Amino acid sequence: MRGTPNSEYDFKMIFRQLFDQVSSTYSYLLASRPGGEALIIDPVLEKVDRYLHLVHELDLKLVKAVDTHLHADHITGLGALRDHTHCITVMGEQTKADVVSMRLSDGDKLTIEGLTFDAIYTPGHTDDSYCFVLPDRVFTGDTLLIRGTGRTDFQNGDARQQYDSIFNRLLKLPDSTLVYPAHDYKGDTVSTIGEERAFNPRLQVKSIDEYVELMSNLKLPNPKMMDIAVPANIRIGLAQEKIALRGWAMTASGAIALVGKPDVALIDLRERSERERHGTIPGSLHVPYPSLQENISEGGMLSELAKATGKRLLFYCAFGERSAMAVQAAQDAGLFTACHIEGGIDAWKRVGGPLTR
Ligand SMILES: [Fe+2]
């Protein structure tokens, strides 16, 4: 077993494979223990009530909702789950979806309490496809299916890239690695890397050119939901618009003037890995988004800070999504001067705001 955070996970891990019959989508709910943090992969909008019910029954706290890629065959549950649970929404950095509050790159770790997934960029089915790896299993999205592979003929799909993603990334995992795909149309639920290498008909090719040829001759009809799902999944609506209308937002260029001012407390909501990669605004406090609620509640650190010093709380994150939710939560908790930097560090960098590493 690799790495410490996953140690013993097989004794206690909660793992649920959930199915949407309409789109034949598998969604996966994982947590390291009852009562702990949970993550869901590829949730379907119509099933959100069922997920929330299950999360409640298992006494879990949903902290992250992840899509392996921008889906063309169903509407994602990411936006609805964010609205209900204030969870962080996660996709790869290449995605065009606006709902995403945390974007991963190849080699990043996707973490919740007690579980660490390796994020691997596996373009081919789409140009924003990722797979998520635990020591004994991999969530393959539509990159690798059971006895199949995801089509490569739309959404910037590319059979050449997919060959590379499958043969040079996924098939390099140990043969015993369990394969959990985003779809199955035949009723299969799980496979292994070794089994797919041996028996997946699409993988019995001798060269990349043979694979490209095979994929270009599939002649599949477009998915029934495509014209609805793709535009809907690109635009799930930003929490930021609502916050700006209430006057609780500040532009990145406006916020530059506030760095170092004694009456403002800059609060970075991102995770440590994001801070290390992109840098932080000088003088900011680090309060990761999942620990926000305890900090803004009566007696919490940020609540005390705001009351004792009269400082204005200025939240920021990667793209402004988590900070918009934080402003709403702080306002709800009675911290009426709370606001955030619209567009987050991404916007901050574009206007040349100072960063420390
Ligand atoms: Fe797909």
Image (cartoon, rainbow, N blue to C red):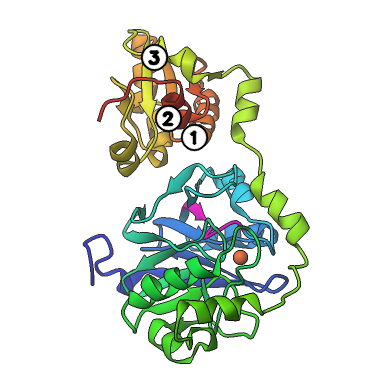
Element carrying mark 2: helix
Query: Label for residue 319?
Result: 1
Report the residue at 43% width, 33% height from top: 317
Report the residue at 49% width, 64% height from top: 29
Confirm whether the magenta stretch covers residue 235: no
Element carrying mark 1: loop
Residue pointed to by mark 2: 345
Depicted 323 relative to depicted 89: above or below: above
Q: Along the polypeptide, which appears first: circle 2 or circle 1?
A: 1
The amino acid type, in three-letter code, at marker 3 is: Lys
Camera-side residue of 103 and 327: 103
Q: Along the polypeptide, which appears first: circle 3 or circle 1?
A: 3
Part of the protein shown in magenta? 62-70
Occupied quadrant, residue 193: bottom left
Camera-side residue of 290 and 175: 175
- Viewer-nearest of labels 3 and 1? 1
Res. 316 visible in picture: no
Which residue lies most toward the bottom here? 199
Give left or right: position of 219 versus 17.
Answer: right
**Counting other residues with Cα less than 10 Å from the Cα at mark 2, is it few (<14), some (14-19), or many (20 or more)?**
many
Residue pointed to by mark 3: 307
Ligand number 1: quarter of image: bottom right
Where residue 299 appears, as percent x and y from the top left, is 36, 26
Occupied quadrant, residue 112: bottom left
Depicted 7 relative to depicted 220: above or below: above
Element carrying mark 3: helix
Q: Check whether the beta carbons of the residues at disc 2 and disc 1 lie within 8 A of each other.
A: yes
Camera-side residue of 94 and 242: 94
The amino acid type, in three-letter code, at marker 2 is: Ile
Res. 356 visible in picture: yes
